[in-house]
Amino acid sequence: MNAAIAALLCGTFASGVIAVIFGLRRPMQPLNTLGGSDQVVTEVAGYSGFFGWFDEIISSQSGTSLASDLAVMNIDRRTYETRRLSAAALIAGVPYAFLLVIAAATSSVFLMITATVIGVILFVVAIFGYWWAFHGKAQKERDVMRHGLSVFLDLAVLQLAGGAGVAASLDAAAERGSGTAFRRIRTALQVASSQGQSLSPYESLRQLGEELALPDLIDLGNAMDRAESTGGEVKSALRRQAHRVRTRLGQDEKAAAGSRSVTMTLPQTLMLAGFMVFLLYPFIAALFSG
C-alpha cells in the first residue's frame, strides 16, 4: 500500500513538473529585446491577478505599482501571474513531493504534516521572491530608460540648435535613436500626432512617464507644457530639463558608488578583526593557560 501511494505521488509530481516546464516555455518579451517594433503589451481588462491584494500591499511599500513594473517590462498581468505561480509551484513542489514520498513509505503522519507546512511556507516565500526579483529587473530597466531619455534630450537640444522647431526636434531625436526609451518615446509622439490637437506631445510624454513611473519623463512633460501654456520659451525649458536629467543621473551614480564603498567596509572590517584575533590568540591563550 505504501509503495502504491509513493508511486501515485511520484506520478502526480512528474505530471506537474511537465506542466510547469511547458508553462515556462512561453517566452517573455521585455522592451529591450523588441528589435525595431513599437508593439506594447496591454493589460487584460478586468484582470487583477490571483494575488492582487498581495501585490498592492507590497508594491505600495516600494514606491511603484506592479502595473508600472509590468508596463516597463512590457509584460501583461496574466503572463506574469502564470510564470510566478509556475515558479512557486516548482520551488515548493519539489521538497513537498519528496517529503510526502518519505512520509508514505514510513507511514509517518508527523512527517506528512511537516511536509505540508514546509510546502506552504516555500510557496509563500517563492511568491514574494518572484515579485522582488521582477521588481528589481523593472528598476534596472527604468535606469536604462533614464539614460536613453538623457541621450534623447541631448539629441533634441542639438536639433534645436540647428534651427528646427520643438515638435520637429522631438520627432527627429526619437527617430535617430534605438533602444527601450527611444521606442517608447517614439510611440508616444506618434500617438500624439495621430490625435492632432486633442493631445500634445508634452501630454503624451507625461502620460508615458506616469505609466512607467519615470519622474524625469513626467517632469519633462510638465515643464514643457507649463512653458507653452504660460507663454514661456519652450526651447529653454527643454534645455533646462536636459540639464536636470544629466545632473540627476550623475548624482544617482555618485550615490550608488558611495553605497558600494560603504558596503565594502563591512567585509574589510571583519577581515581586520579576524586578523587581529589571529595575531592576539597566542598571547591570550598563554595568558589564560597560566
Image (cartoon, rainbow, N blue to C red):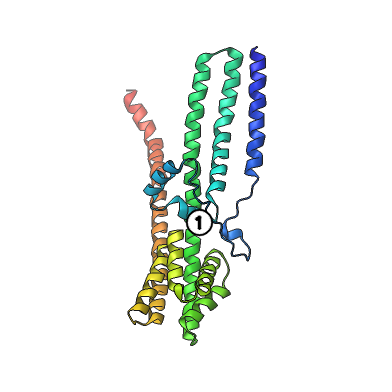
Relative to residue 252, is residue 65 depicted above or below?
above
Relative image position of residue 200 (x, y in whole percent): 45, 74
**Residue under the image location 36 percent in, 27 percent down:** 285
Q: Is residue 180 left or right of residue 288?
A: right
**Image quarter of the C terminus:** top left
**Image quarter of the N terminus:** top right
The three-letter amino acid code for the residue at tag 1 is Ala
Relative image position of residue 236 (x, y in whole percent): 38, 81
Relative image position of residue 16 (x, y in whole percent): 63, 32
**Residue under the image location 63 percent in, 41 percent down:** 23
- Give the residue number, with chain letter if any, for mark 1: 71
Q: Is residue 200 in view?
A: no
**Residue under the image location 57 percent in, 43 percent down:** 82
Relative to residue 111, is residue 221 depicted above or below?
below
Q: Is residue 5 left or right of residue 184?
A: right
* 10 Å crowding of disc 1: few (<14), some (14-19), many (20+): many
